[in-house]
Image (tube, rainbow, N blue to C red):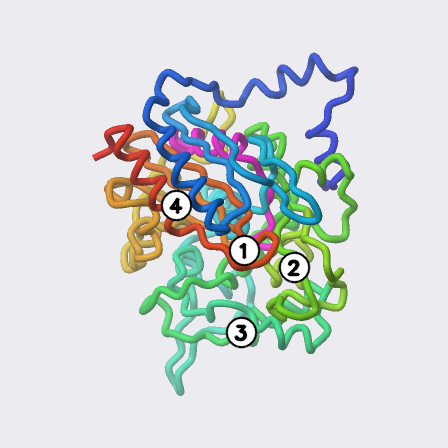
Amino acid sequence: MYFCDEMCRKLFFTAAAALLALTANAQYLTYDGSRSAGLERCDSAIYAAIGEGQIPGAVLCIVQGDRIVYEKAYGSKRLVPEKEPMTTGTVFDLASLSKCVGTAISVMQLVEQGLVDLDATVDTYLPEFAPWTDGADTVRITVRQLMTHTSGLQAGADVLELGRRKADGKPQVLRDYIIKELPRQARPGTQRIYSCPNFITLQYILETVTGERLCDYAQEHVFDVLGLQHTCYFPTNQRIDKRVLRTIAPTEVLYRKGTDPQQLGRRTKYGRALLGQVHDPTARRFGCGNSGNAGVFSTAEDLAVLCAALMNGGQWQGRRILRPETVELMSIPQPGAFGRTLGWDAQSPAAGFAGDALRKDRTICHTGYTGTSIVIDFDRQTAIILLTNRVHPRDEGGVGKTRRAVSDIVAEVLNIY
């Protein structure tokens, strides 16, 4: 198992291991500033969002092929109790980007191994998983429908009801609720309902098939394979070293009044920003930080490696996480999926932030509630990673306009048409 002490080991090398650190970091992308002319125009869009109070700060990383062509930190990592400057090495709560970089890649590895069938019904792996029903009409949900948000599952768990059931810190209560009780709102395959429980259910399938927690599986088979030094889940029952905490961008400060009551559980520490604890209340309160919908923390440079690996057919410097044909399958919208791919978005209305030029052909993208986003254009070998903590200190900021502006500038400067 991977604990926070392990994360600390990765992040902060001892003097005795200093020489080994050079080798361990060899997988990171090279910076090539020769291609960056014009990309500084992105700065004005991001500084405008900071000036408007939409975000405290950000990190932007633009990748072309196997090179980082632009990377910059903006504004502040923290605003309260005192300001701290943002750095390019800041670790962010990725929120729903966890669905893509953690859950989807991990599940697709199991598909490659023949351990999971995308077209099998969920009850093949979770026998008690309830189907959609309407009177005498019954339709069972498939794994593919979970991956494309076409299962018909309700958008989210009833957090307040789970709180009343004293489910905080009890993942089994959440599991039973999603498998047996969560409303199936639409006939499977007929609507796109973006649903966190879809990916929590995928987590349960993975854990049933492998016998491992999702956080442990993804760490060993995805993050460690790529040599990512600053990417992991932070289960809430594990201590985080203070040195690691200092690298993380805080999210929301929780108050008894004025905070969404879904965020407030019996373990809430009022008046303090969430730090190293996933912001998503379902993942934090009931999933204890090990959740299929949220929970991964990472940096822009780590995500640059992952994007480069995907653009290179699933491998980076000989370290493979997926086969080329699997990446190809994940790069195109699935039939009847309303513009969604396996684990990502491509052409649904929610993908508009990627801009018109970057929404053509084989382009995938996703956002995270905390203010994170990734766009990957496979044909043009370009990725845009924009990380913010827009929910700090309160959940009031917005970054949609900024994402679109940055995507449009990148497309124009790099002549992506």
Whether 18 is drawn above or below 292: the answer is above
Quarter of the image for the N terminus: give it: top right
Magenta-colored stretch includes residue 408 = no
Which circle, 3 or 4, is nearer the viewer? 4
The residue under the point 63% across, 67% down is 174
**What residue does disc 3 label?**
182
**What residue does disc 4 label?**
403
Q: How far, Cα to Cα, is label 3 from label 1?
A: 15 Å
Q: Quarter of the image holding residue 259?
A: bottom right
Residue 88 at what x, y percent from top left? 55, 31
Whether 134 is drawn above or below 65: the answer is below
Q: Quarter of the image holding residue 258?
A: bottom right
Residue type of the residue flagged with mark 4: Arg
- Marks 2 & 1, CB-CB < 8 Å contact: yes
Asked if residue 159 lies left or right of residue 337, the reply is: right
**What residue does disc 1 label?**
293
Earlier sequence position, callout 2 versus callout 1: 2
How many badges with numbers are in the image?
4
Q: Is residue 114 visible?
A: no
Q: How far, Cα to Cα, is label 1 from label 4?
A: 21 Å
Q: Circle 3 — which element?
A: loop
